[in-house]
């Protein structure tokens, strides 16, 4: 399990709020600057022109003709097809012919092998389609303008946004076609590549909970009155918190919406990927022992379950029904702490909320856990579902690239448009964490630590005075002024961050390759929201750029 | 701006200055042009290369924005997209999509006019026939000769049956027959009540088809008016006779002298070069095999 | 030309291309392979390229040993990747290396493994890369896993990685040696040596290895030390055959590993409580290998070549010849003894000899069994067995006094004493004082200073029986 893998539901409302604020700021800034320039150039008529342009935008978009957009889209598609942009298929086919050469053979566990196959396919698809579609999008309009073939189009009753939209839809058509073909080849390849005894590739559907801890004394707050946390055992990448064995330390997940009807054949299956950490050798040939306790927070029923051994770095599947059944027929028999027999549906799952407490039973040893390390497994979906959603995510990313490329093509020449698109893509892909870190006062890999001295002036002060980030600067007027100025620039940076989309979020490989279904609320919805959130302004920018551009001017 | 219904195009003080990167004026391509074009006429914009005629056309079409002055075209501002509904434009070189064939080209532009499929099909067929590209309608434009490209360019300009047709150098690159056909077409359009604005530096073309012309030079309007009026030189009388013997010639001279005039030039009348070329080609088509044999001494 | 049809023109082009191909083929055709280059038995070495075959370039390349083939097996993928990357393979490798470190930090083992594979595709002949990452897989990654079977998998994975590296660099002894070293030391000496050694002959993953052993790492179903020995032998062979010196350690040390593996094998048998004929025979063989094979091997030294197994007569001859030599370091026997010291030659020679004797085996067995009896709380029998064993031990020490200074002996004796005394305390309520007479008394008194450290080991064994010594 990857350490950074922690799917959380997307906060649509919060996202919209940020989007609205950023859009407002950008529009206000653009208006202000444009208005000022136009006023300086031609006085009041300049302002009138600005207002005219703005109302023209609304008028033009209202008059958009879908048929014309479609005609331009078909035209774009045809252009790309006739220019043999689709040769990329051949490259792809060749890659797969020789893919075996590049794939390491990991026979240790099926999920590792499947992970390698799936991520290879998805990665290849991403890196093959993006440059092709991106280049097409960046060069389409500039070439059209350079060859002046656009002149015969704009002298027809075609509105500028129709040209932008037509190009976008056309390139997306190409992208979609390429993606479908390449995706199907990839799918067949995966299915054939996975050895039979590994079982079918699948798409697991998890319910994740919220995680909290109890201290080794069994308290939910530590001595300082802070919320209890697990132990840090000194892993370099801090992700999991550890629960000490044979103490009252617990990790407690709260799951919402657990219902018998949603479960697989009425069986409660807990899947876990806990980490083991030993402070002494203990029993070398025996894994650490753990125990789940099911708790219904509504009626207080507590059901300790049969213990389990934690196989580290593997998917541990604990079927509550099977493991706690007795006798030949395998009838589920649950007893609460007082030894009374309880019913899974009527007592434990009543109310839809379920707490699962995890204890480590091996004395002196630790079990490490993070939020996504335990989930309730619902009935699987077909692998194709997850794979298709993975492709859809790639398609959304393609959409972003295409819109970005077409937009930059509206005011830049081909090479420069390519550079701009590539730049924004790379920043969004590689440096998003860095941008996040710049504008946040928390350290990403350990949110408990405060970041100090991020501001430009403060850093300039700290560097020569050798003040480390742990030390607070003294509180005087100069420092307050410095902080105030830094605040302005950090807020500006905060805004700038949102101008670069996070392209990493479109990578659904972590889900598909780990045999998870791609969730709607944690992956597809944010991807869709991001795509729309960026593409709408980009299209408007493209429209304006094309509208205000003298196509003839060289 | 006042526009009477018969004025299809009105410009007032139309000025275009190209600027450099820093916004400093570089070239004044057009200076205070004020002309009107009336409905149903063929209007010619003349001038040497770089005189501002193409700039004028592009300002009319909204491809360039004026630095100063105003344009009204079909009663609307040049930047208004909806005016394009009734305009056809043939660019200087036919900037078409080279990967399309003739039918696809016309179909594509037809779609941009939101024309229904049946109308598009019908118009495409008609226009291809009109510009005589039937034999090549399935070939991609990149295989076309210059003349064929011009003709398909004209066809696309007419796809929407426009009221106003703007032609940039319509006969450039055409052979004399093509040129003649083009001129016949323009006259045909005029007869159907269309307004045509063409710009050219070939005086003969303009002379043949235009009702009114404007001559531009260095961005300034030099001459403007009806062609017949402009070409008529009141100080010269041309007399055409059948072949005169030298004696008769002398007598004629004497008569002229008596009236205070004199012979400026005596010559056999010739047709223009263009006319001769067309005659020759036409005759050769009618009687194949005939050759011109130089007379022996 | 102009009146040819398009088809004829194309034919002419094809002809031209074929014509141009002729010199290319003559110059650049690759050498013929006279054997299927892929799956061979590990470590098998043969000259695969026929001398003088192929085009001019390949002949020259062979003559001057410039080709990749002269280093080992060539992987087509690797060559393709390097060709595609033009000159950027260094950069690409560095980038991958950082990725690998990051993945290791994040415990993404499958990803780490595939990154490592990419690295060696780019740098197939960089021995340090193979060494570092092979170790990383067999030691660092394996230790991260909790289940012993999982750990064993990654140890094997490291071994296989070394073996692959050996295929690419089969003319260099280094990776043969690392393969053997990991098979021997990692499997035989880890905390989990009991399980690992068992797994080596009896795979935990029965589904994948129904025969019980992994044909890739243990094709002959041997003991791990004997399998390691095969690899040490191959390392020495490769060094001899291709005249390539290893770059790991001093030559005399490197060469003793086949014999050393035999000793380790015998020691492992003893650790597992095997003191019968099998273990005695193993010691005997170890002695033979040590004294008669390794001991007669010659090594370079400043005055020529010397060997370590010097008989009495030879010693006298050398002494006679050395008499006139003015300086100590010009004498042959000086160098012989220096090399012997370096390799602890005499100790191991004696050890093998002693352990090969049945009395010694009996002594060990008695002490081992006594300890088992102690743990099963049969203290009376344990005491008598201890006394018996210690007496036998004492007799052997009288016979071979050198052993008295050997750490292993001291530890074995001291721990036996600790157990015996504890048993006496339990049964009789007191342990014998130093005034009384008891077997191995001299040793006990002499090495009292080691007692505190050995007490820990004693307590551990008391509880679990797990031996670390």
Image (cartoon, coloured by chain):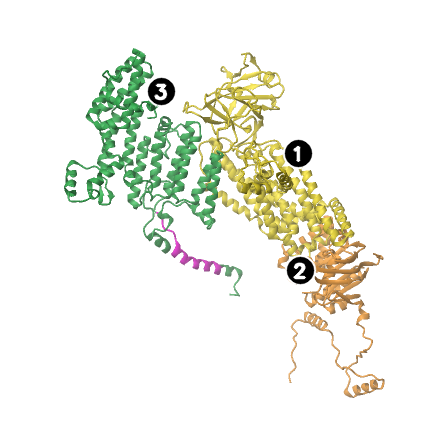
Chain colours: A yellow, B orange, C green
Figure check: B76 above or below A493: below
Q: CA distance from mark 2 to mark 1?
A: 57 Å
Q: Classify residue B138 as left or right of residue B256.
A: left
Chain of the residue that carries numbered disc 3 in the rendered image: C
Magenta highlight on residue C16: yes
For the point 55% across and 45% down, which residue is it? A128
Q: Which residues are magenta?
A: C11-33
Please say whether residue C12 is one of the residues in the magenta stretch.
yes
Q: Left of C58 or right of it: where is C417?
A: left
Provide the major secondary structure of the magenta segment.
Answer: helix
Disc 1: CA contacts within 10 A as few (<14), some (14-19) or many (>=20):
few
Q: Which residue is mark 3?
A: C459
- Determine whether A540 is above or below C197 in the image: below
Residue at the farthest front position: A476
Report the residue marked by disc 2: B149
Mark 1 lies on residue: A14
Expressed as whole percent of the image width and height from the top left, the position of residue B76 reads: 79, 54
Q: Is residue B41 visible?
A: yes
Q: Are marks 2 and 3 on the same chain?
A: no
- Does dot 2 land on a helix, a strand or a loop? helix
* Image marks 1 and 3: residues in contact by CB distance under 8 Å: no
Closer to us: A217 or A153 = A217
Chain ID of residue with mark 1:
A
Whole-Å distance between the Cαs marked 2 and 3?
A: 100 Å
Question: A395 or C469: which is nearer to us?
Answer: C469
Q: Which SS class for mark 1? A: helix
């Amino acid at each position: 399990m990857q350490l950074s893998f922690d799917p959380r539901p997307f906060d649509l409302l919060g996202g919209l709020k940020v989007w609205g604020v950023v859009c407002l700021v950008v529009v206000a800034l653009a208006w202000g600057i444009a208005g000022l320039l136009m006023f300086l150039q031609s006085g009041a008529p300049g302002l009138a022109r600005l207002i005219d342009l703005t109302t023209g935008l609304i008028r033009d978009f209202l008059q958009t003709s879908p048929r014309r957009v479609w005609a331009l889209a078909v035209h774009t598609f045809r252009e790309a097809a006739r220019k043999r942009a689709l040769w990329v298929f051949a490259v792809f086919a060749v890659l797969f012919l020789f893919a075996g050469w590049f794939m390491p053979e990991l026979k240790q566990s099926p999920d590792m092998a499947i992970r390698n196959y799936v991520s290879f396919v998805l990665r290849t698809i991403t890196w093959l389609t993006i440059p092709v579609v991106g280049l097409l999008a960046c060069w389409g309009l500039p070439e059209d303008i350079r060859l002046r073939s656009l002149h015969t189009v704009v002298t027809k009753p075609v509105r500028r946004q129709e040209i932008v939209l037509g190009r976008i839809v056309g390139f997306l058509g190409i992208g979609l076609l390429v993606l479908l073909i390449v995706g199907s080849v990839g799918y067949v390849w995966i299915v054939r590549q996975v050895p039979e005894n590994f079982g079918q590739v699948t798409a697991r559907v998890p319910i994740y909970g919220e995680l909290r801890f109890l201290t080794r004394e069994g308290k939910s707050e530590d001595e300082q009155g802070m919320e209890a946390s697990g132990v840090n055992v000194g892993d370099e990448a801090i992700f999991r918190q550890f629960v000490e064995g044979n103490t009252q330390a617990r990790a407690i997940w709260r799951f919402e919406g657990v219902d018998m009807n949603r479960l697989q054949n009425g069986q409660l299956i807990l899947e876990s990927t806990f980490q083991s950490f030993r402070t002494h050798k203990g029993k070398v040939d025996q894994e650490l022992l753990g125990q789940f306790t099911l708790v219904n927070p509504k009626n207080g029923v507590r059901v300790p379950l049969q213990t389990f051994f934690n196989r580290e770095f593997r998917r541990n599947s604990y079927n509550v029904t099977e493991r706690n059944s007795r006798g030949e027929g395998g009838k589920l028999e649950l007893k609460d702490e007082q030894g009374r027999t309880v019913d899974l549906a009527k007592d434990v799952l009543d109310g839809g909320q379920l707490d699962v407490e995890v204890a480590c039973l091996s004395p002196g040893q630790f079990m490490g856990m993070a939020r996504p390390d335990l989930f309730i497994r619902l009935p699987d979906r077909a692998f194709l579902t997850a794979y298709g959603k993975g492709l859809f995510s790639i398609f959304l990313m393609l959409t972003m690239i295409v819109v970005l490329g077409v937009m930059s093509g509206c005011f830049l020449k081909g090479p420069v448009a390519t550079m701009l698109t590539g730049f924004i893509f790379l920043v969004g892909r590689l440096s998003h964490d860095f941008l996040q870190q710049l504008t946040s006062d928390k350290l990403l890999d350990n949110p408990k630590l405060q970041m100090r001295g991020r501001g430009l002036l403060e850093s300039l002060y700290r560097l020569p005075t050798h003040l480390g980030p742990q030390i607070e600067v003294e509180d005087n007027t100069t420092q307050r002024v410095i902080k105030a100025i830094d605040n302005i620039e950090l807020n500006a940076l905060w805004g700038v961050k949102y101008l670069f989309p996070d392209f990493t979020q479109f990578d659904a490989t972590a889900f598909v390759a780990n045999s998870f279904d791609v969730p709607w609320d944690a992956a597809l919805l944010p991807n869709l929201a991001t795509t729309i959130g960026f593409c709408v302004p980009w299209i408007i920018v493209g429209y304006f750029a094309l509208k205000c551009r003298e196509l003839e001017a060289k | 701006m006042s526009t009477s219904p018969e004025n299809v195009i009105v410009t007032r003080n139309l000025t275009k200055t190209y600027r450099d990167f820093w916004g400093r004026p570089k070239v004044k391509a057009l200076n205070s042009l004020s002309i009107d074009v009336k409905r149903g006429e063929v209007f010619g914009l003349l001038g040497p290369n770089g005189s501002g005629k193409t700039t004028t056309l592009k300002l009319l079409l909204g491809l360039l924005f004026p630095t100063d002055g105003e344009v009204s075209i079909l009663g609307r501002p040049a930047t208004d997209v909806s005016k394009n509904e009734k305009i056809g434009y043939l660019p200087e070189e036919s900037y078409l999509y080279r990967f399309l064939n003739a039918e696809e080209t016309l179909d594509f532009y037809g779609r941009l006019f939101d024309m229904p499929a049946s109308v598009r099909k019908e118009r495409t067929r008609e226009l291809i026939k009109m510009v005589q590209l039937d034999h090549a309608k399935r070939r991609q434009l990149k295989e076309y000769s210059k003349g064929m490209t011009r003709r398909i360019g004209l066809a696309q300009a007419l796809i929407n049956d426009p009221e106003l047709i703007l032609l940039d150098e319509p006969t450039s690159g055409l052979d004399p027959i093509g040129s003649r056909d083009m001129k016949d077409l323009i006259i045909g359009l005029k007869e159907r009540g269309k307004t045509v604005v063409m710009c050219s530096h070939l005086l003969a073309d303009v002379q043949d088809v235009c009702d009114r012309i404007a001559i531009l030079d260095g961005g300034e309007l030099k001459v403007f008016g009806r062609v017949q009026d402009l070409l008529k030189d009141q100080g010269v009388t041309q007399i055409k006779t059948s072949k005169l013997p030298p004696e008769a010639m002398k007598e004629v001279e004497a008569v002229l002298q008596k009236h205070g005039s004199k012979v400026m030039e005596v010559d056999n009348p010739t047709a223009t070069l263009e006319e001769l070329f067309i005659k020759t080609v036409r005759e050769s088509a009618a009687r194949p095999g005939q050759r011109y044999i130089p007379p022996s001494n | 030309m102009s009146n040819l049809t398009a088809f004829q023109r194309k034919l002419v082009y094809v002809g031209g291309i074929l014509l141009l191909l002729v010199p290319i083929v003559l110059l650049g055709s690759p050498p013929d392979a006279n054997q299927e280059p892929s799956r061979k038995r590990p470590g098998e070495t043969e000259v695969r390229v026929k001398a003088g075959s192929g085009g001019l370039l390949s002949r020259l390349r062979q003559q001057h040993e410039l080709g990749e083939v002269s280093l080992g097996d060539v992987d087509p993928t690797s060559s393709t990747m390097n060709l595609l990357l033009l000159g950027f393979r260094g950069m690409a490798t560095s980038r991958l290396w950082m990725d690998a470190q990051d993945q290791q930090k994040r415990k993404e083992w499958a990803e780490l493994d595939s990154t490592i594979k990419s690295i060696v595709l780019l740098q197939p002949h960089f021995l340090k890369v193979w060494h570092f990452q092979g170790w990383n897989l067999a030691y660092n990654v394996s230790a991260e896993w909790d289940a012993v079977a999982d750990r064993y998998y990654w140890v094997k994975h490291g071994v296989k990685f070394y073996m692959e590296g050996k295929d690419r660099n089969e003319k260099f002894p280094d990776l043969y040696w690392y393969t053997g070293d990991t098979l021997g030391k990692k499997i035989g000496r880890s905390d989990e040596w009991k399980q690992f050694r068992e797994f080596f002959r009896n795979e935990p993953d029965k589904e994948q290895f129904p025969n019980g052993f992994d044909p890739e790492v243990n094709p002959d179903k041997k003991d791990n030390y004997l399998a390691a020995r095969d690899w040490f032998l191959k390392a020495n062979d490769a060094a001899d055959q291709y005249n390539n010196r290893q770059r790991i350690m001093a030559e005399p040390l490197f060469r003793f590993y086949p014999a050393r593996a035999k000793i380790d094998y015998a020691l492992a048998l003893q650790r597992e409580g095997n003191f019968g004929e099998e273990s005695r025979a193993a010691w005997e063989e170890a002695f033979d290998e040590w004294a008669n094979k390794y001991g007669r091997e010659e090594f370079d030294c400043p005055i020529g070549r010397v060997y370590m197994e010097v008989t009495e007569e030879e010693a006298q001859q050398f002494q006679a010849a050395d008499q006139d030599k003015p300086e100590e370091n010009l004498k042959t026997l000086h160098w012989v003894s220096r090399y012997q010291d370096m390799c602890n030659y005499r100790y191991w020679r004696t050890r093998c000899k002693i352990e090969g004797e049945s009395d010694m085996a009996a002594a060990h067995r008695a002490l081992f069994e006594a300890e088992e009896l102690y743990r099963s709380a049969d203290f009376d029998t344990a005491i008598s067995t201890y006394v018996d064993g210690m007496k036998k031990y004492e007799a052997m020490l009288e016979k071979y006094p050198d052993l008295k200074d050997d750490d292993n002996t001291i530890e074995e004796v001291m721990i036996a004493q600790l157990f015996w005394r504890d048993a006496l305390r339990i049964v009789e309520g007191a342990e014998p004082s130093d005034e009384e007479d008891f077997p191995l008394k001299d040793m006990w008194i002499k090495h009292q200073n080691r007692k505190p450290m050995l007490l820990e080991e004693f307590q551990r064994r008391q509880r679990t029986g797990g031996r670390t010594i």
